[in-house]
Protein backbone atom coordinates (compact mmCIF):
# COMPACT_ATOMS: atom_id res chain seq x y z
CA UNK A 1 0.00 0.00 0.00
CA UNK A 2 1.38 3.41 -1.00
CA UNK A 3 0.62 4.98 2.38
CA UNK A 4 3.10 2.63 4.06
CA UNK A 5 5.73 3.55 1.46
CA UNK A 6 5.17 7.26 2.18
CA UNK A 7 5.71 6.78 5.92
CA UNK A 8 8.60 4.39 5.37
CA UNK A 9 10.45 6.90 3.21
CA UNK A 10 9.31 10.08 4.95
CA UNK A 11 10.18 8.98 8.49
CA UNK A 12 12.86 6.50 7.50
CA UNK A 13 11.07 3.68 9.28
CA UNK A 14 13.35 0.89 10.49
CA UNK A 15 14.15 -2.07 8.25
CA UNK A 16 12.05 -4.35 10.47
CA UNK A 17 8.90 -2.37 9.56
CA UNK A 18 6.19 -4.94 8.80
CA UNK A 19 4.27 -3.04 6.09
CA UNK A 20 0.89 -3.21 7.83
CA UNK A 21 -1.23 -1.02 10.14
CA UNK A 22 -0.03 -2.67 13.35
CA UNK A 23 3.60 -2.17 12.32
CA UNK A 24 2.99 1.49 11.46
CA UNK A 25 1.27 2.01 14.79
CA UNK A 26 4.12 0.31 16.66
CA UNK A 27 6.77 2.42 14.91
CA UNK A 28 4.90 5.70 15.47
CA UNK A 29 4.31 4.96 19.14
CA UNK A 30 7.93 3.92 19.78
CA UNK A 31 10.17 6.42 17.92
CA UNK A 32 13.32 5.24 19.76
CA UNK A 33 14.76 4.40 16.35
CA UNK A 34 14.72 8.12 15.42
CA UNK A 35 17.49 10.50 16.52
CA UNK A 36 15.63 13.84 16.90
CA UNK A 37 13.57 15.05 19.84
CA UNK A 38 10.50 15.95 17.78
CA UNK A 39 8.79 14.97 14.53
CA UNK A 40 5.98 16.61 12.60
CA UNK A 41 4.65 14.37 9.81
CA UNK A 42 2.39 16.36 7.48
CA UNK A 43 -0.36 14.57 5.58
CA UNK A 44 -1.21 16.86 2.68
CA UNK A 45 -4.72 16.69 1.25
CA UNK A 46 -5.69 14.37 4.10
CA UNK A 47 -9.30 14.39 2.94
CA UNK A 48 -8.12 12.63 -0.23
CA UNK A 49 -5.92 10.06 1.52
CA UNK A 50 -7.02 6.54 0.64
CA UNK A 51 -10.14 8.02 -0.98
CA UNK A 52 -11.17 4.72 -2.54
CA UNK A 53 -10.93 2.77 0.73
CA UNK A 54 -12.91 4.24 3.64
CA UNK A 55 -11.88 1.54 6.11
CA UNK A 56 -8.18 2.04 5.32
CA UNK A 57 -8.60 5.81 5.71
CA UNK A 58 -10.20 5.26 9.11
CA UNK A 59 -7.29 2.99 10.07
CA UNK A 60 -4.84 5.68 8.97
CA UNK A 61 -6.57 8.38 11.01
CA UNK A 62 -6.94 6.07 14.01
CA UNK A 63 -3.25 5.10 13.82
CA UNK A 64 -2.14 8.74 13.60
CA UNK A 65 -4.49 9.77 16.41
CA UNK A 66 -3.25 7.02 18.72
CA UNK A 67 0.38 7.85 17.98
CA UNK A 68 -0.26 11.54 18.58
CA UNK A 69 -2.00 10.80 21.86
CA UNK A 70 0.87 8.54 22.91
CA UNK A 71 3.34 11.40 22.55
CA UNK A 72 1.11 14.20 23.83
CA UNK A 73 2.18 13.79 27.43
CA UNK A 74 5.92 13.18 27.20
CA UNK A 75 7.75 14.79 30.11
CA UNK A 76 11.39 15.60 30.60
CA UNK A 77 13.13 15.34 34.00
CA UNK A 78 13.12 19.14 34.29
CA UNK A 79 9.31 19.03 34.16
CA UNK A 80 8.83 20.65 30.74
CA UNK A 81 6.15 18.95 28.70
CA UNK A 82 7.15 18.27 25.13
CA UNK A 83 5.39 16.48 22.35
CA UNK A 84 7.68 14.16 20.45
CA UNK A 85 5.22 13.64 17.62
CA UNK A 86 2.72 16.12 16.22
CA UNK A 87 0.72 15.03 13.17
CA UNK A 88 -0.55 17.77 10.86
CA UNK A 89 -3.38 17.06 8.42
CA UNK A 90 -4.02 19.56 5.65
CA UNK A 91 -6.87 20.05 3.21
CA UNK A 92 -8.47 22.85 1.24
CA UNK A 93 -11.06 24.99 3.01
CA UNK A 94 -14.00 23.47 1.18
CA UNK A 95 -13.00 19.98 2.35
CA UNK A 96 -12.55 20.92 6.01
CA UNK A 97 -16.08 19.96 7.19
CA UNK A 98 -15.74 16.53 5.56
CA UNK A 99 -12.29 15.97 7.07
CA UNK A 100 -13.55 17.02 10.51
CA UNK A 101 -16.42 14.56 10.20
CA UNK A 102 -14.04 11.76 9.23
CA UNK A 103 -11.75 12.54 12.15
CA UNK A 104 -14.72 12.80 14.50
CA UNK A 105 -15.92 9.40 13.38
CA UNK A 106 -12.47 8.00 14.06
CA UNK A 107 -12.43 9.58 17.53
CA UNK A 108 -15.84 8.16 18.41
CA UNK A 109 -14.80 4.73 17.16
CA UNK A 110 -11.59 4.87 19.22
CA UNK A 111 -13.46 5.99 22.34
CA UNK A 112 -15.94 3.13 21.94
CA UNK A 113 -13.25 0.47 21.61
Image: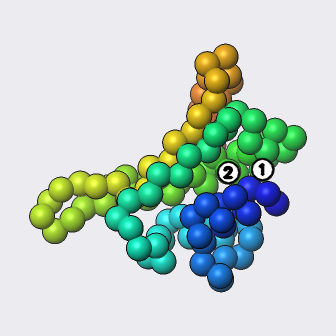
Q: Does residue 37 appear to the left or right of 96 in the view shown?
A: left
Name the colour scheme: rainbow
Residue 75 visible in rendering: yes
Q: Residue furthest bottom?
A: 16
Q: Which residue is mark 2?
A: 60
Counting other residues with Cα less than 10 Å from the Cα at mark 1, is it few (<14), some (14-19), or many (20 or more)? some
Asked if 37 appears above or below 82 in the picture, the reply is below
Asked if 112 appears above or below 103 in the picture, the reply is below
Residue at 56%, 46% (x, y): give it: 42
Do tag 1 and tag 2 residues touch (Cβ < 8 Å)? yes
Residue 86 x/y as whole percent: 44, 49
Residue at 52%, 42% (x, y): give it: 88
Q: Which residue is mark 1?
A: 56
Residue 56 x/y as whole percent: 77, 50
For this rendering, which residue is in front, 78 or 12? 12
Residue at 74%, 56% (x, y): give it: 3
Give the quarter of the figure containing the N terminus: bottom right
Residue 48 x/y as whole percent: 75, 36
User: Which corner quadrant of the image does residue 106 belong to?
Assistant: top right
Amino acid sequence: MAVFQEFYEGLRLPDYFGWNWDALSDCLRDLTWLPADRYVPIVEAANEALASDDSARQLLFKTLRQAGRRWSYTQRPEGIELSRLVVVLTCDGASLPDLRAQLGSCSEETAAS
